[in-house]
Image: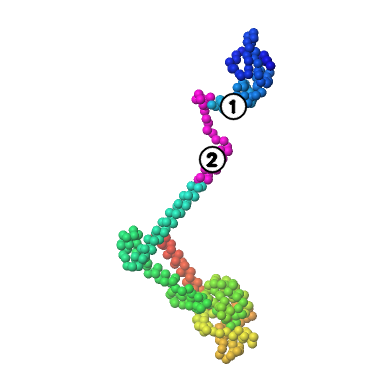
Amino acid sequence: MKVWMQLTTLSVGLSGLALYPIMGSFAFTVSSPTRIDRKSVRLFVDDYGTNPQSWVSANDPDRHWTEEFDIYEAKKNGTYWESFEPTDEELEAMRATLVQDEADVLLEQLQALQAEEVEFTEKEKERANLALEMKEKGWSSSAITNTLDVAVDDTLEQTSEAVQSMQEAWELDPVDMATVESHTLVDMDEDTGEPVRQQMVFVDEHTCIGCTNCAVTSPGTFFMEPDMGRARVMKQWGDDDETIQIAIETCPVDCIHYVPFDELKKLEVERRDQNINFKARLVGGGDNGGVGMAHMVGGAAKFTPAPEISGNMGSRCNNCPSRGCRDCPMFGVGKNPAFEKREKERKDKIRKRRLQQERESQQKSAEL
């Protein structure tokens, strides 16, 4: 097969291709099957890729090595430039690796610090225990300091008399409010030696039915005595006046009384080791506030009689002490002139004491 083409120059020899000069042109014969691209007048050999001696055009679309060859030539002559810019995938991988590395480094640092802290604490603990043992054996402070290099300051252990007395007070056994009588906890006036407040609260336990109303309404003043299940005052005026008044007014059997301090002390002393006859109410023991012979039910001297309270001696209305009658037998409830005078004096004294404390506080602030 012969193919005629007009060629200006041809300096490549191909195997299987014969060239013949004819009238200023070349004629060549291709031994293998060929095809011609008429638009670009290029020669394509069908055995491209199988015969290493085959000639291939530079414009061949199947020529995959053109870009790599150009890069190679540029690197060879020194005109090639590399931007070194990573791809998006490489950037994401780099970020993930960096975050993981930073987390690992931080975790290692924290573990190292924790280990150092534990080691330091253990060493200081050993030194402190050894210093304490040396001090108990009679070593001087200077000897302990020179031996263990531990500062021993005896002045920190020296406390004032006020602090020592406070510590002794706090180290006392806790107070059992169920056994302490309320009159022993009443605040006394420094000037007169009398109670700051004359009106006290007392519960007639023989009349009480154990409804727990007062203990729930005013828990700072009343509590339920565990042996007999009756209400009792554990601290005088442990709540505000209004709360205590509500507890008294809502009592279903009116067993809470206002009494003076002297009578309160007498009643609480007589109440010691009492034994209440819970069957007395079945035979009329509830009448007259429990006063009578009902406590004798079940034995002549087996149970304690009901206390004699001044509030039960006089005539009481059907809503005592809520009504607040002028001649109420309960101490301080009605318009008792003597009580009102003492109450007015008490409030005036409290007001003057507060003014004095404020004046002293302002004077100290001005000096500072």
The answer to whether residue 280 is left or right of residue 104 is right
User: What is the span of residues highlighted in magenta in the rendered image?
Assistant: 73-102
- Quadrant where the C terminus lies? bottom left
**Residue at x 44% of width, y 70% of height:** 170
In the image, taking residue 324 as reference, residue 197 lies left or right, namely: left
Nearest the viewer among 170 and 91 is 91
Estimate the x, y position of residue 203 in percent, counting from the top left. 56, 79
What's the amino acid at mark 1? Trp
Does the image show residue 263? Answer: no
- Identify which residue is drawn at 32% across, 65% down: 139
Few, some or many residues within 10 Å of mark 2 (<14, 14–19, 20+): few
Q: Which mark is residue 65?
A: 1
Q: Which mark's residue is nearer the viewer, 2 or 1?
A: 1
The answer to whether residue 220 is above or below residue 64 is below
Residue 336 vs residue 239, the one in the foreground: 239
For label 1, count other residues whose C-alpha is less than 10 Å away and answer few (under 14), some (14-19) or many (20+).
few
Residue placed under numbered mark 2 in the picture? 94
